[in-house]
Image: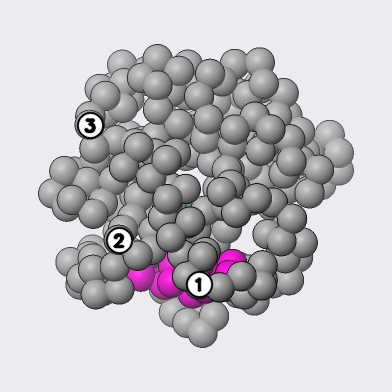
Amino acid sequence: MKYIDIHCHLNFDDFDLDRGEAIERCREKGVGMIVVGTNIEESKKAVKLAEENSDIWAIIGLHPTEVQNEKFDYEAYKKLAENPRTVGIGECGLDYYRAEHASKTLQQEVFEQHIALANEVKKPLMLHLRSGVGEAQNAYKDTLEIIQKHAKVPGDVHFYAGSLDEAHEFIKLGFRLSFTGVITFARNYDEIIKSIPLNMIMSETDAPYVTPAPYRGKRNEPAYVTEVAHKIAEIRGESLDVVLPHLVDNARKLFGI
Ligand SMILES: [Zn+2]
């Protein structure tokens, strides 16, 4: 494994026509991947993919924008969480971006249930955090309070988009930060990528979303994580020989793979 995509949705219908080929394109480049669930059905699909492929691992959970559609069935998720191919709990967290999402109270309650499950099975958290407008809608600040109080396991903040100060707070609590293809075309992540320790950064695609340059306009896929990894090295001004093995190692350590 030369690269790892620590957050993709190869389980989604977007890959129904070419899932096998997408996996092959990863193997050609030495890309391993972690497939992330967003509800019970997608979580089951993630675990099945991980059971069938030695270079795929699963993360299971109920996405914060789905908590109004599905009740978090702790026992059903626990069964998936205990599967040896499951390496984390999520994606879970807080999404204040749109008013039609569930209330903060419900989102926080379901988030805390995910944390309880992660603590129970001793597997790391995969966090999805998205703020709304204004300090009262800062999902990063609320999450720091919640994990400080409840989490006994480390984790990753997927698609990190908080401030530099918050980045350091997460790192202090043992949370890694991962970046998507957005860093290939938006420059507002550069300062954070440069300032945090190399052993706390991870690479992801969030495929089928946020396709990196030079593939923008096409569906994203996990094989494109090579672009993200190369860009992390470029932004930091470090060589690929140093950065690529670190990105794989960081994932191996956090997820025990
Ligand atoms: Zn995702």
Q: Quadrant of residue 170?
A: top right
Compare marks 3 and 2 and give the one earlier in the sequence. Answer: 2
The nearer-to-camera label among 3 and 1 is: 1
Residue 186: x %, y % from top left: 69, 72
Q: CA distance from mark 3 to mark 2?
A: 20 Å
- Look at 67% across and 21% down and name the residue there: 148
Identify the mark at residue 1; answer none if there is no mark.
Answer: 2
Compare marks 3 and 1 and give the one earlier in the sequence. Answer: 3
Do labels 3 and 2 touch, CB within 8 Å?
Answer: no
Few, some or many residues within 10 Å of mark 3 (<14, 14–19, 20+): few
Identify the mark at residue 75; answer none if there is no mark.
Answer: none
Amino acid type at image mark 2: Met
Amino acid type at image mark 3: Pro
| Magenta region includes residue 107 | no
Residue 168: x %, y % from top left: 74, 41
- Does the magenta stretch mainly form a helix, a strand or a loop? helix
Q: Which one is nearer the viewer's eye here, 196 or 150?
A: 196
Quarter of the picture containing the C terminus is top left
* Residue for badge 1: 240
The nearer-to-camera label among 3 and 2 is: 2
- Label 1 sits on a secondary structure element that is helix
Most extreme residue toward the right, as rendered?
135
* Residue for badge 3: 84
The magenta span reads 220-233
85 on left or right of 96: left
Q: Does the residue tagged 1 have its C-beta within 8 Å of any atom of ligand 1? A: no
- Look at 35% across and 37% down and name the residue there: 256
Amino acid type at image mark 1: Leu
146 on left or right of 240: right
- Look at 36% across and 19% down and name the residue there: 121
On the question of residue 64 being in view, the answer is no
